[in-house]
Image (cartoon, rainbow, N blue to C red):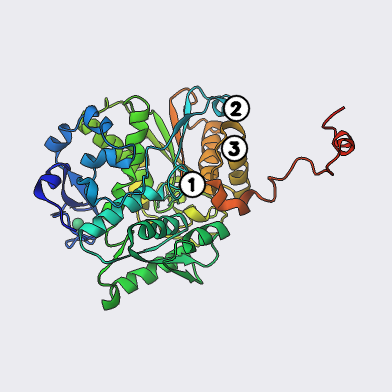
Amino acid sequence: MSVSTDARAASAAQGLSCRNCGATYDLLPIHACEECFGPLEVAYDPLLLAAVTHELIEAGPPTLWRYAPLLPVGAVPDSRVDMGAGLTPLVRADRLAAELGMRALWVKDDSANPTHSFKDRVVSVALTAAARFGFDRVACASTGNLANSVAAHAARFGLSSVVFIPSDLEAGKVVQTAVYGGTLVAVSGSYDECNRLCSELAETDDFAKTAFVNQNVRPYYAEGSKSLGFETAEQLGWRLPAQVVVPMASGSLLTKIDKGFGELVSAGLVEGTPWRVFGAQATGCSPIAAAFEAGQDVVTPVKPSTIAKSLSIGNPADGPYALDAVRRTGGVMAHVSDAEIVDGIGLLARTTGIFGETAGGVTLAVLRQLLAAGRLDPDAETVIYNTGDGLKTLEAVSPTARPTHVIEPSLAAARAAGLVS
Ligand SMILES: *Cc1c(COP(=O)(O)O)cnc(C)c1O
Ligand SMILES: [Zn+2]
């Protein structure tokens, strides 16, 4: 797939730059710096950013692609691998706020995406990049939601896909990948082991023309997450929230919501009011939050053991950058137990009507913990991110979310159960 020059001019992307040493590169399918092996990310031309207006964005489609000028690829609509991800509801959560003693709380409900998680954002951008760079196959290592999304997008667009998952994933995540018909490899090992296997495969001739969405096109993949930050601001009426609580696996999503806020300020699309970013993990896989607590810059890998499988990355690539973003903005990181995660899922459901997956439970439980510890301001406008659908992780709540009554089909039985007098 080729892209014309005028199309490229419509994106403010300038090139890739190294997050460690600042070396710059063209927009190519590369992810590591040749100078220092640091990770590359997309950089934007400040003048082109400044040319982006509210009107331009609002005239775009009701998907993440309305922010195409702020993304590295997909300026031409026909070039997009687009299933309609993005522009999910920002739900004002007054009943939840009241229960938590907060003044203004919203849930950004990213379960309302085509495959029911925020991963549709990163996949749409990654596969658009993969098509532009001429890859003929897409692949990924996944903790579940990425697998669902890659397989679905590949099916819609007739691409061949190879997905690697740990074999102990939730049933829903396995089925929701397999049903789309690509190659699905269940590996008897952790996500981190799947990821290492993918790095090795990527070096082989057989996989030379395969885009690994979270490896060789990772700089493009990661940019898709910014759209969660852009939408939050647009849906608040082009304002930044004072506080956001974000679940962390690799830490990429958190860093990109922060980057997105920064770009909106640079582009003059919102005022530069301060925002604080808070990071949430499960205690059973909390390498980034542990480094935060210990005051360290390096993240020590762990072996995950938690019901929050979507967040179970023991060796998180963006951990140091997530630490930077949280420390720079004055936020905090925290982690919660599996029991607190289950409570969090229930509280979110009972007060907002949103059934979140385990990652959503992590985020709400961390919000609650930070409030109790006085580390998050209950009076400041706060947005929490529900990044996946509870139907994907039924195992987490099925032991406790049960019928309140079980009766025979008769009035007598209803009476005996106390449903009528
Ligand atoms: C992948 C994922 C995240 C966070 O991913 P990062 O690797 O930190 O970008 C959060 N929630 C859900 C449900 C996910 O699947
Ligand atoms: Zn470098």
Nearer the observer, 20 or 43: 43
Give, as a three-letter code, the residue at label 3: Ala
* Foreground residue among 85 and 241: 85
Tell me residue 404's x, y (percent). Answer: 76, 40
Q: Secondary structure at mark 2?
A: helix
Task: Tell me: 329 left or right of 345.
Answer: left
Q: In terms of secondary structure, where does tag 3 sit?
A: helix
- Residue 295 placed where, x, y %? 41, 46
The residue at label 1 has a CB less than 8 Å from ligand 1: yes
Q: Which residue is mark 2?
A: 99
Residue shown at 55%/43% (left/top)? 361
Quadrant hosting residue 272: top left
For image coordinates 52% across by 67% down, the residue present is 167
Residue 388: numbered disc: 1
**What amino acid type should be assigned to the residue bearing mark 2?**
Glu
Left or right of 146? Residue 49 is left
Q: Secondary structure at mark 1?
A: loop
Q: Left or right of 256: which side holds 94? A: right
At label 1, the amino acid type is Gly
Q: Quadrant of ligand 2?
A: bottom left
Q: Quarter of the image holding residue 260?
A: top left
Whichever of callouts 1 and 3 sits on the residue coming sooner in the sequence is 3
Q: Residue furthest front?
A: 410
Give the labeled residue for mark 3: 349
